[in-house]
Amino acid sequence: MSHDALAADAVLALYEEDGALLHGHFLLSSGLHSDTYLQSARVLQYPAHGARLASAMVAGIPEAIRSQLRVVVGPAMGAVLVSYECARSLGQRSLFTERENGQMRLRRGFALEPGEGVLVVEDITTTGGSTRECMDAVRAAGGRVLAVSAIIDRSPGGIADFDGIPYFPLLRLPVQTWRPEECPLCVAGTPAVKPGSRALR
């Protein structure tokens, strides 16, 4: 298998190997509940694993789009390392968006040229909410989102695209989620934990 080629079972094997595929009762950043959580930080702590995943993500984007990409942008915190490694694989710049007064935006002096081709990346997508916020921030800064990618799309139905912008997740792994009022784990009295980066605030 080449460095760029990474089969779906190999992606999952990396998460399992690094203890990043968790089972329990989790409150996701989307507000949904789930019995499965993918803790990408445990995989990305190993640079070789992060580089391997990012290289495969970039390789999965058609050359016609890839040749136009000049910047990779991901929302902090979860996608900062993903953005960096994808940009390194592309030989381009890496930026990240952050929340300021509740709104996602580019900070720290980051800027985009008008119409500059951008790849927006995530580690995991569930509803795609933070991805869309990141895309809006890129557009507000003058960039042009050409594609979206992620390590794993865990949305139950699968995200086809982002309002017409093509989406190239490395792995589609549907995970059961529930609204809080419908969660059987809550009914059973199992406490929910929130392991994601937003819980750090």
Image (cartoon, helix red, strand yellow):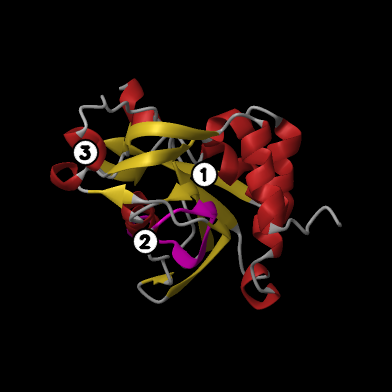
Sequence-wise, the earlier of marks 1 and 2 is 1
**Disc 1 designates what residue?**
95
**Disc 3 designates what residue?**
102
Percent position (x, y) of residue 148? 50, 62
Nearer the observer, 176 or 52: 176
Q: Secondary structure at mark 3?
A: loop
Of the two numbered discs 1 and 3 in the rendering, the one whose residue sits closer to the viewer = 3
Q: Is residue 65 left or right of residue 146?
A: right
**Disc 2 designates what residue?**
139
Query: Quadrant location of residue 31?
Result: top left
Q: Which mark is residue 57?
A: none
Nearer the observer, 36 or 188: 188
Tell me the crowding category of disc 1: few under 14, some 14 to 19, or many 20 or more residues within 10 angstroms, Cα based.
many
Tell me the crowding category of disc 3: few under 14, some 14 to 19, or many 20 or more residues within 10 angstroms, Cα based.
few
Sequence-wise, the earlier of marks 3 and 2 is 3
Of the two numbered discs 3 and 2 in the rendering, the one whose residue sits closer to the viewer = 3
Q: Please tell me which residue is depicted at 58% across the width and 29% down the height of the picture.
A: 42
Percent position (x, y) of residue 141? 37, 55
